[in-house]
Amino acid sequence: MLATANIPASVELSVGSYVELCFAVVGQTLPADHGYGLYSAIVHRCPEIHERKGLSILTIAGIPDRQGKIFLTARSHLRIRLPYDSLPMVYHLAGKQLSIGSHAIRLGIPQIFMVSPADRLHARIVTIKNHQEPESFLEAARLQLAALGIVGEAIVPLDAQGKPDRKTIKIKTYSVVGFGLEVSGLSAEDSIRLQILGLGGKHRMGCGIFVPMRVF
């Protein structure tokens, strides 16, 4: 059975059962690949997060310098998605400084948002063990969606060179391969379900987390 299908009995998949804390971020730069470092810094401040199930941490957006760093802006935020009853556990991160390698950021007072449905979602990177080629990866992602009872059309988007959007993240001394993923045609219920459960692994390091796609 696919790991994603093993849903804890305590997880209530409904609007209001999960929320997203959005912390303003004050700082200058971060490594472009900072998922593992960010998670480690948060656990250092809040060790109980390590044991809490159903928690996802999105990476922080910024302007890439194409040399391994991003510049933070007024729109850079730390977003943590978690069960509503876990709010007190992470709320006290407000005002704290996090050290990520040689970079430091400070978190502001968070805003709290409900997880809202959208018929089209995307994840910046999804990692599925033993699936490092786009065809195999997409097949595995579709199987995971089916195992979760989610109906939608999944595709791997193309990068600027017209190739499947392949990405890697570094965890300690090794790299993990993943791909961007878009899922469309979702019902409201399935959209909430996918945003709460995600796909693949490494959700605490920014992987497998779905957000509504922007419409330009």
Image: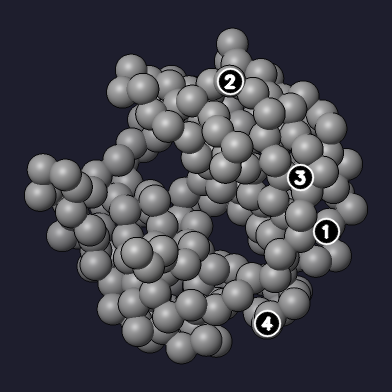
Q: Does label 3 or label 2 sit earlier along the sequence?
A: 2
Q: Point out which mark residue 49 bears.
A: 3
Pinpoint residue 118: horizontal percent, then vertical percent: 48, 77
The residue carrying mark 2 is: 28
Task: Out of 65 and 131, give the one closest to the viewer.
Answer: 65
Quadrant holding the N terminus: bottom left
Within 10 angstroms of label 1, few (less than 14), some, or many (20 or more) residues?
some
Could you tell whether 187 is left or right of 216 in the image? right
Q: Does label 2 or label 4 sit earlier along the sequence?
A: 4
The residue carrying mark 4 is: 14
Pinpoint residue 22: horizontal percent, then vertical percent: 69, 51
- Residue positioned 29% across, 50% down in the render: 179
Q: Which one is in front in this view, the residue at disc 3 or the one at disc 4?
A: 4
Disc 2 to disc 4, C-alpha distance:
37 Å
- Residue positioned 47% across, 49% down in the render: 207
Q: Residue furthest left?
A: 162
Amino acid type assigned to the residue bearing label 1 in the image: Ser
Disc 1 to disc 3, C-alpha distance:
9 Å
Q: Does label 1 or label 3 sit earlier along the sequence?
A: 3
Does any portion of residue 93 appear in the rendered image?
Answer: no
Task: Out of 214 and 190, give the one closest to the viewer.
Answer: 214
Q: Does label 2 or label 1 sit earlier along the sequence?
A: 2
Based on the displayed image, in which of its 4 quarters is residue 113 positioned? Answer: bottom right
Amino acid type assigned to the residue bearing label 4 in the image: Ser
Pinpoint residue 39: horizontal percent, then vertical percent: 63, 35
Disc 2 to disc 1, C-alpha distance:
30 Å
Within 10 angstroms of label 4, few (less than 14), some, or many (20 or more) residues?
few
The residue carrying mark 1 is: 86
Does any portion of residue 201 appear in the rendered image?
Answer: yes
